[in-house]
Image (cartoon, rainbow, N blue to C red):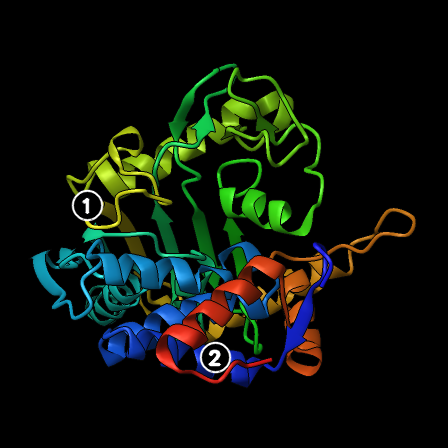
Amino acid sequence: MTANEVIRAPVAAVEAFCVSAFTACGADAETARDATRSMMHGSVHGVDSHGVRLTAHYIRALEGGRLNKRPKPELRRIKTGSGLLEADHAQGARATYCAMDHAMEMARESGIAAVGIRNSSHFGPAGAYAKYAADKGFLALVVANSDSFVRLHDGTERFHGTNPFSVAAPSGGPDPWLLDMATSAVPYNRVELYRSLGVTLPVGVASDAKGVNTTDPHLAEMLAPVGGEFGFKGAAIGGVAEIFSAVLTGMRLSPEILPMGGPDMSTPREMGAFVLAMDPDGFIGAGIVEAGMRRYLDLLRNSPARPDCRVMAPGDREWAEAARRRVDGLPLDPVTQDGFRTLAATYGLKLPF
């Protein structure tokens, strides 16, 4: 096997392997289900940095005690449309799907509802939870902070996390309008993926230990905020995620969160997150909202494009990639392959490739 070799595996086989691995390590059924479906969202839709390559990491955190294998998340409803979910140090996807379920239930009554999440951990792709709500007919917003890895605009040290930000709206069709972005120029897991693949980083997305831009993923010690020369915009949006997920929930700010990669895998990270759900029937009505979205997307996609380009709505690239991957299989980079082999040997599991 060469250092750059990627293999493909069937979607169903990879999903079954991940569920089996979480179950084998002692995680409860809800954790195995939710951790897997968040990662599968990433891998199926081409967000490989937040896909199944995280399986071995999450299991390491579960085995080490950082994450609770059998958490009991509890909602404390504060007002008609707001509450706090005590996640009990659950794996992040377990906590966030639970919080979104509560937010949607409250929004059916109040029209709009938000849930702050306390004592959670890394939750993977923010878009998984926004899409989950949109698929059920809600508009949604999801944000979180994470351990410091992104410099401020003109800064030379890590400050914010990659602080993801996702918004989704039902489109009246099978796929929603979906914005899913890190507030850094790229997610840090993308740097790790490029290290595994031996791929050079784009210009202007990462810096070395002194804050000097680098395209070598092995020298990347921090990320730039999204926006390039206008990175102050990305840094400010990262601050929005910080306020909603950490300040509003009383959880740790990015500089206070233990590093995702360890070495301490026994101490809970005490992270926050935030989800918001809006019921269209609390506004103009679901039918009119969906009709408006269809009209908007039709105008957008038929807008004139530059030569050899195509105008796309947020999410269009992901839906096309998902269709391909459901046929061709999921690409697994060498690090992910090695992680799967280790898990298979440890727990006596059948590899999906």
Residue 285 visible, this angle: no
From the viewer's perspective, tell me whether residue 48 is left or right of residue 201: left
Q: Quadrant of the N terminus?
A: bottom right
Residue in the picture at 28% in, 73% down: 25
Residue 348 seen by the camera: yes
289 is higher (above) or lower (below) than 67: below
Q: Quadrant of residue 203?
A: top right
Frontmost residue, 134 versus 51: 51
* The quadrant where residue 80 appears: bottom left
Which residue does the image show at 36% across and 68% down from the upper left? Answer: 35
Mark 1 Cα shell of 10 Å, populated few (<14), some (14-19), many (≥20): many
- In the shown orientation, is residue 287 left or right of residue 315? left
Disc with the residue nearer the chain's start (2 vs 1): 2
User: Toward which corner of the image does residue 323 lie, by quadrant?
Assistant: bottom right
Image spot of residue 146 (x, y percent) = 35, 41
Mark linked to residue 136 = none
Disc 2 and disc 1: Cα gap in Å?
28 Å
Residue shown at the point (44%, 76%) measured from the top left: 344
Residue 108: x %, y % from top left: 25, 71
Residue bearing the label numbered 1: 270
- Determine which residue is flagged by label 2: 15
| Disc 2 element | helix
In the rendered image of this protein, does residue 34 appear above or below residue 228? below
Element class at badge 1 = loop
